[in-house]
Amino acid sequence: MLPSTSDYDTLTAKFNWSLPDAFNMAGAVSDRWAAQDPDRLAIRHILADGPHEDWSHRSLNQAANRFANALSAAGVQRGDRIALLLPQIPQTAIAHIAAYKLGAIAVPLAALFGLEALRYRLTDSGAKVLVTDDAGLAKLSEIRDDLEGLQLVVSIESRAGGALSFEELLSGASDEFQTLKTTPDDPALMIYTSGTTGQPKGVLHGHRVLLGHMPGIELSQNFLGRDGDLLWTPADWAWAGGLLNALFPSLSLGVPVLSYASKKFDPEFAFHLLEKQAVRNAFIPPTALKMLRTVERPGSRYNLNWRSVGSAGESLGRETYDWFAEEFGFAVNEFYGQTECNAVLGSSAEIGVTRSGAIGKATPGHEVAILDETGIPLPPETLGQIAIKRPDPVMFLHYWNKPDATRDKFIGDWMITGDQGLMDEDGYVHFVGRDDDIITSASYRIGPGEIEDCLIKHPAIALAAAVGKPDPLRTEIVKAYVVLKEDQQADKVLEDSIRSFVRERLSAHEYPREIEFVDALPMTTTGKVIRRKLREQAKTDHGVS
């Protein structure tokens, strides 16, 4: 979608949205390529025992057609919700494409969700169909009686609990299906927020969400779509990062996608995969990049073919940015957004839009500002809330069954993110932290990102998170939760070393007055640190209920 130019200002000036009257995501990611270049590689799936299976656009499209026909025969109609509780496998893509062909609404669910998380989402969405595997069936068996609206369960593995076989449904259906004509605003995809505060909300997107993502993803992958490009992400396809930052934009551009159903991110294996499969492009969330940083000398040990790496989901930080550039010889392209409105800020080192410690600039086609609490745009270098102006093709339609929450997400025509940041004189946005994450200590407002970035520079630390702990004198003190590298031993000497390390590099009011060593940090299924749980733990330690 981006015009051909190497200058950001020219790129922004030349860009205009031109949405078609009719648009269906299935047509963009599958139908078009199946017709134009059917033998083109769509997905290369790495099997658990090592070999891989290739899916062409023809085979992917035919499978989606078969599944759409089977679902239609079972009574699935336009607007019905189809829940997908599946890992990163081709069947997940097939089920998504089939849902869009039908005009149904895909509801991706993370395989790591527990019973309560699944019960809530399946009930709240009113899912009529669930497509899952044996692990999902086992969970479903414990909550099935609570799901009155769930009429059809399809399994890609066994047929436990009366589930229908995915393979049998496909084998008995026609491989021809006429994709329903939809508009860009017709509902297509509902992704639940992680629920770090309150109950998760179903974020409903129209088919246009793919079009809205394209400039940001093309930019952050240094103009994805060049000959030889092959993209991989460790991000679960059940969240916006995996689907809309990687899978769908790649397929839409004709770029093959590498898939692998990993239960746990292994940094050594990730480098092995990148090398063996000659991956050219990657979307790697910041937490995964920080874990890659723990591998010794990866730049010299692995023969990597990659030319672009995009990262989003939480703050990347200056330390990880600088490490990557030094180790691999090119910069990570950080970008920013939310489930409700994604890829609206971004970087592209190829055109000189990159700055250590900054998210990037406004992606072409999006208007982003820093607002005060009344919705007034603030001048440069002033802390405020990051906001995006509507209308915007990438912006959500509304929260499912929550009109009040939808209304509260806006101040006038600005969608407020709940993220604090500032814009410098050059237009780069610097992320400071979520509203709830800001630490107030002795009248200072402190963002956790800078502290965490400094902490992981310490040679003993693998991961870290900083939160505010209640304090009668300062309101809050900075408390750090620290995961050490494998060869390190927690003791008072190391604790003092870490405290001094941060104080010397930041300031007297930012160093962690309290440090707790932990085996792991609480994470969402999208790989973000759940600071809310750490804040609650800090309050409990302080005796605050």
Image: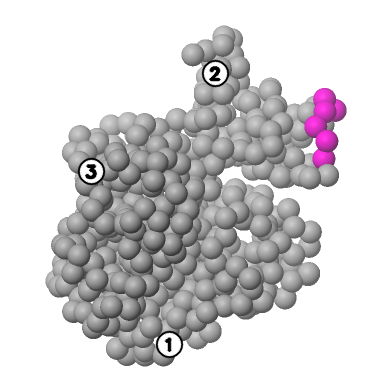
Secondary structure at badge 2 equals helix
Q: Which residues are magenta?
A: 488-493
**Residue receiving disc 2:** 539
Towards the viewer: 201 or 110? 110
Work out how far the residue at label 2 is from the one at label 1, CA to CA, in angstroms: 55 Å
Relative image position of residue 319 (x, y in whole percent)? 66, 49
Main SS category, magenta section: loop
Residue at 56% x, 23% y is 537
**Residue receiving disc 3:** 148
Secondary structure at badge 3 equals loop
Residue at 49% x, 48% y is 112
Q: Residues within 10 Å of mark 2 (few under 14, many from 20)?
A: some
**Residue receiving disc 1:** 40
| Amino acid type at mark 1 | Arg
Residue at 67% x, 58% y is 267
Relative image position of residue 506 (x, y in whole percent)? 68, 34
| Amino acid type at mark 2 | Lys
Q: Is residue 319 left or right of residue 23?
A: right
Task: Name the N-terminal-most of marks 3 and 2.
Answer: 3
